[in-house]
Amino acid sequence: MKKIPFYLLLIYMFSLATALFGYWIDADEPVNSFAYQMFEVFMLSLIIYVLLLLFFFIPYFLFQFFKRIIKSKH
């Protein structure tokens, strides 16, 4: 449980890097202002962050829950 803040930060850095990479490889001509484009990158990174949290922490907490159940029965 002590490493969870580190994992949260690591997952957000990965999602931000993914969003910035997507912004970098986008071949469309920008029509919006730079501030709006950065808002889109930030919101995309938050969406990716939430999806990664669901994919990584739901199994993690389920494993912890089942581990506690098994320990309580012994």
Image (cartoon, helix red, strand yellow):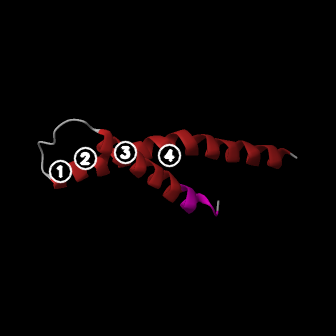
Q: Disc number at residue 18?
A: none
Q: Nearer the viewer, mark 1 or mark 4?
A: 1
Cα–Cα span, label 1 and label 3: 17 Å
Mark with earlier residue (3, 4): 3
Mark with earlier residue (4, 2): 2
Of the pair 37 and 69, the residue shown nearer to us: 37
Please provide percent x and percent y for residue 62. Answer: 64, 42
Q: Which residue is mark 1?
A: 36
Tell me what residue is drawn at x 81 percent, y 49 percent.
Answer: 72
Cα–Cα span, label 3 and label 4: 20 Å
Mark with earlier residue (1, 3): 3
Tell me what residue is drawn at x 65 percent, y 59 percent.
Answer: 1
Is 44 in the magenta? no
Q: Nearer the viewer, mark 4 or mark 2?
A: 2
Q: Which residue is mark 2?
A: 40
Q: Is residue 6 above or below residue 65?
A: below
- Position of 53 with respect to 65 (left or right) is left
Please provide percent x and percent y for residue 68. Answer: 75, 48
Q: Disc number at residue 21?
A: 3
Q: Disc number at residue 53?
A: 4
Tell me what residue is drawn at x 63 percent, y 45 percent.
Answer: 60
Disc 2 residue type (three-letter)? Glu
- Crowding at mark 2 (Cα within 10 Å: few <14, some 14-19, many 20+): some
Of the pair 15 and 68, the residue shown nearer to us: 15
Cα–Cα span, label 4 and label 2: 20 Å
The boundaries of the magenta stretch are 2-7
Disc 1 residue type (three-letter)? Tyr
